[in-house]
Every structure is written in C-alpha cells, then in structure tokens.
Amino acid sequence: MKKSYKIDVDCANCANLMEQAAKKTEGVKDCTVSFMTLKMKIEFEEGANAAAVMEKVRASCKKVEPDCEIFL
C-alpha cells in the first residue's frame, strides 16, 4: 500500500534526513520525500498497520529534524 503525506520541513537537507530515517523504520518498504512539493510518499510492507507505522516514522523524523512535521 502506498500513501502520500503533507510535510513541513525547512530545507532540502532536512528532507533528505527525514527520508533516510523513514526508510529505516520497521514497516516501511520505501519512502521518498520531496522538498519542492513538501510531500512524503511511503510504501508500506505487506500487512503493516499504516497508522502505527506512521507514528514510528514521525518519531524517527523528529529525532533527526526536530522542527519537521508530518500531517497524518
């Protein structure tokens, strides 16, 4: 399953850090973050609970970039 989320991030480097953190999160198959469109596209692993995984993704992203926001 793939989903797209609106994000708020200050710079392209921060977006890259968010993408790398999200890719390492359990339940995420793939992730792309676009600074230009302020969107995060996530492909979830088969059978993963998207809501629970996104809470983990949000926590991981906050660790690398405290000022970021993901609108769930």
Image: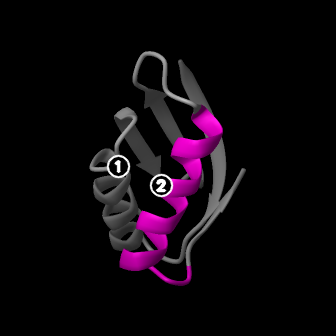
Q: Nearer the viewer, residue 26 or 66?
A: 26
The residue shown at (28%, 56%) is 20
Q: Which mark is residue 25?
A: 1
Residue type indicated by callout 2: Val
Location of residue 51 with respect to 62 vertically, above or below: above
Q: Judge the density around disc 2: few (<14), some (14-19), many (≥20) Cα neighbours within 10 Å.
A: many
* Left or right, residue 32 beside residue 50: left
Q: Does 66 lie within the magenta span?
A: yes
Which segment did they paint magenta?
Answer: 50-67
Seen from the viewer's position, the closer of residues 16 and 25 is 25
The percent coordinates of residue 57 (x first, y second) are 48, 55
On the picture, is 71 further left or further right than 33? right
The residue drawn where x is 49% and y is 55% is 56
Query: Residue 69: x percent and y percent?
Result: 63, 68
Residue 54 image position (x, y, % from top left): 56, 48
Estimate the x, y position of residue 15 in percent, counting from the top left: 41, 63
The residue at which mark 2 appears reads as 57
Name the residue located 52 percent from the left edge and 43 percent from the top edge. 53
Q: Secondary structure at mark 2?
A: helix
- The amino acid beneath tag 1 is Thr
Specify few, some or many for label 1: CA neighbours under 10 Å numbering under 14, 14-19, or 20 or more. Answer: some
**CA gap, disc 2 and disc 1:** 6 Å
Callouts 2 and 1 close, C-beta under 8 Å = yes
> First in sequence: mark 2 or mark 1?
1
